[in-house]
Amino acid sequence: MAPVGPCCWLSGYQAASELKGFGYFHLVAGMYKDMSCVDAGRFARDLRVAADRIERRYGKLELEYDDLWEFEATLLTIRTTASWYSLVAELGFGVFAWC
C-alpha cells in the first residue's frame, strides 16, 4: 500500500511512562514526533527491541507475584504500542504526535 500521510494518533502516556522508567528516553521523545508510515514501522521495531531487552535484563530477577504481574503488564503495554505503530505503518498511514 502506498503511503498516504498521517491520519492517526495514539495517547501513549502509559507506554511513554514505562519506557522512561527503564531509561529509553529516545523512544519517549519519538512518541512526541509526527511520523511517516516508514518511520512508524521503524519505531514499532525499536519499541519491540526495547521490550525484548527489558525482558532479558529484568525478567531473570526473582520477582514477587505483584511485581511480576506489574512487570508483565509493562511489557504488554510497550508491545501493544509497538503493534499499533506497526499496524498503522502497514496500512500506509503516518502518525501525528500525541501531545
Image (cartoon, grey):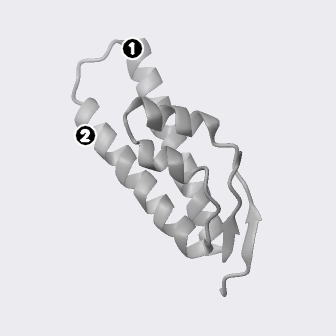
11 with respect to 82 (left or right): right
* Residue at x 34% of width, y 12% of height: 64
Position of residue 20 measured from the top left corner of the image (x, y, whole percent): 46, 34
Q: Which mark is residue 6?
A: none
53 with respect to 90 (left or right): left
Q: Quadrant of residue 94?
A: bottom right
Mark nearest the camera among 1 and 2 is 2
Specify the amino acid type for callout 1: Tyr
* Residue at x 38% of width, y 21% of height: 68
Position of residue 9 measured from the top left corner of the image (x, y, whole percent): 73, 55
Is disc 2 surrounded by few (<14), some (14 to 19) or many (20+) residues within 10 Å?
few
93 with respect to 57 (left or right): right
7 with respect to 55 (left or right): right
Q: Secondary structure at mark 2?
A: helix
Specify the amino acid type for callout 2: Arg
Q: Which mark is residue 56?
A: 2
Position of residue 33 measured from the top left corner of the image (x, y, whole percent): 61, 57
Q: Nearer the viewer, residue 87 or 42?
A: 42
Which residue of the protein is positioned furthest toward the bottom in this rendering?
Answer: 2
* Residue at x 36% of width, y 53% of height: 49
The residue singled out by tag 1 in the image is 65
Q: Please tell me which of labels 1 and 2 falls first in the chain.
A: 2
On-image quarter of the N terminus:
bottom right
Instruction: Give the distance between the C-alpha atoms of the residues marked 1 and 2, in whole angstroms.
Output: 18 Å
